[in-house]
Amino acid sequence: MGAGRSVPMAQLALLTLLALLGARAVTVDHVTSQVVFYQRTDRSQQGSGEFMQEFDQDEILYVDLERKEIVWRLPEFSKFTSFEVQHALRNMAVIKLYLEKLIERSNHTRAQNVPPEVTVFPKGPMELGEPNILICFVDKFFPPVLRLTWLKNGQEVMEGVYETDFYPRQDNSFRKFSYLPFFPSQGDFYDCRPGARLDSEELRMWVPHDEGRVGCTLGRRDSQLEVGGKAEPN
């Protein structure tokens, strides 16, 4: 299931069902969550949804609703548990019908867009010429309609990119990860940019470092990583 198209200020009708299994009014050590939502834009009448299971806020699996198949976050997870895809499809059909009935019977207003906070960081310590993975973490945004784009030296990069589904937060906003395998090279720039136009203020963070080392620069409305340059505090 890919990320949805960005729809700035579109009229959205969103139904979110979050079932916390085992969550009670007492302290618990672990929580298994089932996340189900369906949404529709009024302008295009296109709908999208998500069905996912988590354990302690870590994804176990999601259901590819187009292919009607289970996608395990790690293949090893399938050895410890099982899941019937028809269960997810039945749940999606029910909440889709419920949403359509709510739209028919209720007045609905434009959903308020909340732009994400974007952070880019490498999976491990970076060394020039050694394989690594860039991680783009987008957080605290709403609604769950967001397209992320990776750029290398200003050019879009798609090969090897992997994205997670939308992960819910307790405040009803969402978070998402995108991963880009790369080889750090002297002078290269990498950007992770949300597809929507954001109204966030300009934010720059300069990390000073010695010549030949690597550093990060976070720029306006995106996150940018510079490899091999020398930066001074702004």
Image (spheres, rainbow, N blue to C red):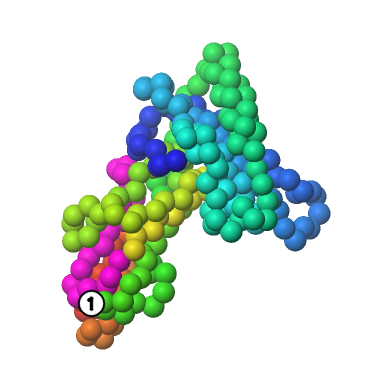
Counting every numbered tag in the picture gives: 1
Quadrant housing the C terminus: bottom left
In the picture as drawn, the residue positioned furthest to the top comes out as 104
Label 1 crowd (10 A; few <14 / some 14-19 / many >=20): many
Does residue 22 appear to the left or right of 188 in the view shown? right
Does residue 204 appear to the left or right of 86 in the view shown? left
Three-letter amino acid code of the residue under disc 1: Gly
Residue drawn at (25%, 54%) of the image: 157
Is residue 185 one of those drawn in magenta? yes
Main secondary structure type of the part rendered in magenta: loop
Residue situated in front as seen by the camera: 22 or 234:
22
Residue drawn at (64%, 38%) of the image: 84
Write down the quadrant of residue 4 in the picture. Answer: top left
Query: Would you place residue 135 above or below residue 91 in this image?
Result: below
Element type where label 1 sits in the image: loop
User: Which residues make up the magenta segment?
Assistant: 182-204
Quadrant housing the N terminus: top left
Q: Badge 1 is on which residue?
A: 228
Write down the quadrant of residue 94 in the picture. Answer: top right
